[in-house]
Image (cartoon, rainbow, N blue to C red):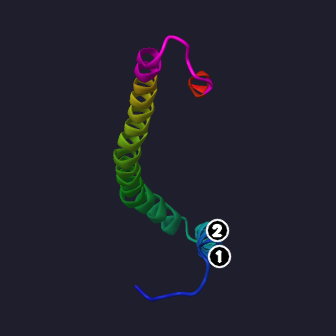
């Protein structure tokens, strides 16, 4: 992969603009040649849709365990704070009231 000095936001914007131009060019070509438009619909359905589904499943495969682990960590910290608060003294300290 080639090194680039462009910021990520600019690269995302260029990709978005490229997609818009490619889509408009495909629709414009479809006005003169309906067979090419039908071919691009088949390519979109048979190639890009499955790739998008794989991308989303991989994304969920990573994100959902991270969310679950962070929620479990929050729960374990709160339970530890609750036990230490009740066993330390009969009158809780002001720092224990925050939790």
Mark 1: give few (<14), some (14-19) or many (20+) Cα within 10 Å: few
Describe the element under mark 2 as helix, strand or loop: helix
Task: Identify the secondary structure beneath mark 1.
Answer: helix
Q: Is residue 66 above or below residue 29?
A: above
Instruction: Provide the residue span drawn in magenta.
Output: 82-94
Question: Magenta stretch containing residue 26, yes or no?
Answer: no
How far across and how far down the image is residue 51, in percent? 37, 57
Q: Which residue matches tag 2? A: 20
Of 59 and 27, which appears nearest the observer?
59
Taking the image as shown, residue 6 lies to the left or right of residue 3, namely right
Q: Nearer the viewer, residue 91 or 17?
A: 91
Which residue lies at the image location 41% right of the left edge and 49% below the top edge? 56
Q: Residue 10 carries which label?
A: 1
Quadrant of the rendering where the N terminus is positioned: bottom left
In front of the other: 6 or 75 = 75
For marks 1 and 2, give the CA distance.
Answer: 15 Å
Q: In which quarter of the image is residue 34?
A: bottom right
Give the mark nearest the N terminus, 1 or 2: 1
- Residue 64 location, x and y as percent? 39, 40
Residue at point 38% right, 32% down? 72
Give the x, y percent position of residue 61.
34, 46
């Amino acid at each position: 992969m080639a090194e680039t000095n462009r910021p990520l936001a600019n690269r995302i914007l260029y990709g978005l603009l490229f997609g818009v131009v490619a889509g408009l060019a495909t629709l414009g070509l479809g006005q003169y040649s309906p067979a090419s438009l039908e071919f691009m619909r088949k390519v979109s359905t048979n190639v890009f849709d499955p790739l998008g589904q794989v991308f989303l499943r991989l994304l969920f495969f990573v994100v959902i365990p991270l969310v679950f682990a962070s929620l479990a960590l929050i729960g374990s910290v709160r339970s530890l704070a609750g036990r230490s608060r009740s066993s330390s003294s009969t009158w809780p300290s002001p720092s224990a009231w925050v939790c």
